[in-house]
C-alpha cells in the first residue's frame, strides 16, 4: 500500500515539476528550483518556457500563496491554464485575464503572483512584452553591468474579479540578462536573507557570466546565507541575449 501511494505521489509530482528548458536561437536560459520542505519535489513556486509558434516563447514565473501540496495543486492549475491559453492568444493581458477566473473558481483562498514575458527572438533582435501580476519585478542586467528592476507592478491573481497589470515592451540587447525570481530568493526566512540591494550588487558581479551560472550563484548564495532555515520555495530563471 505504501509503495503504491509513493508511486502515485511521484507520478503526480512529475507533472508539476518545471519542464526542461527549450532551445531558443540567440537566447540562453538558466534556472534553479528548490521547493520548501522534505520529501516534496514541488511547491508553490514555478516557472515555464513555452514555445509559441516559430519565433515566440511564453516565459512564466510565479508564486502561489502558501506551501506544500495545497499550493502545488494551484501551481498545476496555473501552469496548465497558461499552456492552454498561450497557443491561442499569447498576449500578456489575455493570459492573465484567463488565469484570474480560473483561480477564483477553485475557491481555495489561495492567490498567485506571476510575471509573464512574451519573448520574440529574430535574427537581429530580441524583444519582450512584460506583465507583472503582483510579483517582484524582473531585474535587467545590461552588458555594461547596470542592474535595475523593469516592468510595472499589477494586481495579484485570484483575489479580484478583474486584473490590472500593464504590459511593458522592451528589447534585450546582446549581452543583456533578465532575471525572473520568486520572493523565496530574497525573503525565504532566516536571520540573514539576501535583500534587494544585495541582490542587485550580486547580480552586477555576474555580468557576462553564462545564464545558468547566474542562476546557480544566485540560488546558492541565497540558500547558503540561511542554511537549514529556508522557509519558502525558491525559483530563479535567467533569460540572456547572445
Image: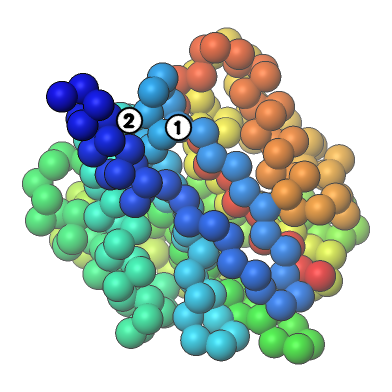
Tag nearer the camera, 1 or 2: 1
Query: Which residue appears at 20% of the width and 50% of the height?
Result: 159
Residue 6 against residue 170 in the figure, above or below: above
| Residue 57: % across, % down | 53, 75
Query: Which residue appears at 57% of the width and 33% of the height?
Result: 185
Q: Is residue 190 visible?
A: yes
Report the side of 45 relative to 143 (left or right).
Answer: left
Instruction: State the quadrant of the N terminus.
Output: top left
Residue 123 against residue 178 in the figure, above or below: below
Front-most of residues 108 and 137: 108
Front-most of residues 86 and 157: 86
Query: Which residue appears at 30% of the width and 62% of the height?
Result: 80
Residue holding disc 2: 67
| Residue 101: % across, % down | 17, 62
Name the N-terminal-most of marks 1 and 2: 1
Report the side of 232 relative to 221 (left or right).
Answer: left
Report the side of 43 relative to 55 (left or right).
Answer: left
Q: Are marks 1 and 2 in contact (CB under 8 Å)?
A: yes
Q: Is residue 112 visible?
A: no
Instruction: State the quadrant of the C terminus.
Output: bottom right
Alpha carbon distance from label 1 to label 2: 8 Å
Residue 151 against residue 54 in the figure, above or below: above
Query: Which residue appears at 59% of the width and 85% of the height?
Result: 55
Q: How is the image coloured?
A: rainbow
| Residue 29: % across, % down | 67, 59
Q: Residues within 10 Å of mark 2 (few under 14, many from 20)?
A: some
- Residue 35 — which label? 1
Under tag 2, what secondary structure? loop
Under tag 1, what secondary structure? loop
Amino acid at each position: 500500500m505504501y509503495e503504491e501511494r509513493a508511486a502515485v505521489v511521484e507520478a503526480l509530482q512529475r507533472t508539476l515539476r518545471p519542464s526542461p528548458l527549450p532551445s531558443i536561437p540567440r537566447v540562453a536560459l538558466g534556472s534553479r528550483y528548490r521547493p520548501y520542505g522534505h520529501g516534496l519535489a514541488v511547491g508553490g513556486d514555478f516557472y515555464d518556457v513555452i514555445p509559441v509558434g516559430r519565433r515566440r516563447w511564453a516565459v512564466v514565473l510565479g508564486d502561489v500563496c502558501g506551501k506544500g501540496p495545497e499550493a502545488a495543486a494551484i501551481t498545476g492549475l496555473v501552469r496548465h491554464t497558461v499552456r492552454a491559453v498561450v497557443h491561442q492568444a499569447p498576449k500578456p493581458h489575455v493570459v492573465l485575464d484567463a488565469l484570474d477566473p480560473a483561480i477564483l473558481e477553485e475557491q481555495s483562498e489561495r492567490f498567485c503572483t506571476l510575471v509573464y514575458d512574451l519573448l520574440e527572438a529574430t535574427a537581429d533582435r530580441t524583444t519582450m512584452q512584460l506583465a507583472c501580476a503582483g510579483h517582484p519585478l524582473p531585474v535587467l542586467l545590461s552588458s555594461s553591468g547596470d542592474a535595475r528592476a523593469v516592468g510595472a507592478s499589477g494586481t495579484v491573481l485570484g483575489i479580484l474579479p478583474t486584473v490590472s497589470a500593464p504590459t511593458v515592451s522592451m528589447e534585450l540587447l546582446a549581452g543583456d540578462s533578465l532575471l525572473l525570481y520568486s520572493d523565496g530568493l530574497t525573503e525565504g526566512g532566516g536571520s540573514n536573507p539576501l535583500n534587494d540591494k544585495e541582490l542587485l550588487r550580486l547580480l552586477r558581479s555576474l555580468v557576462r557570466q553564462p545564464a545558468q551560472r547566474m542562476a546557480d550563484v544566485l540560488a546558492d548564495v541565497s540558500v547558503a546565507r540561511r542554511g537549514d532555515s529556508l522557509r519558502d520555495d525558491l525559483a530563479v530563471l535567467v533569460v540572456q541575449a547572445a
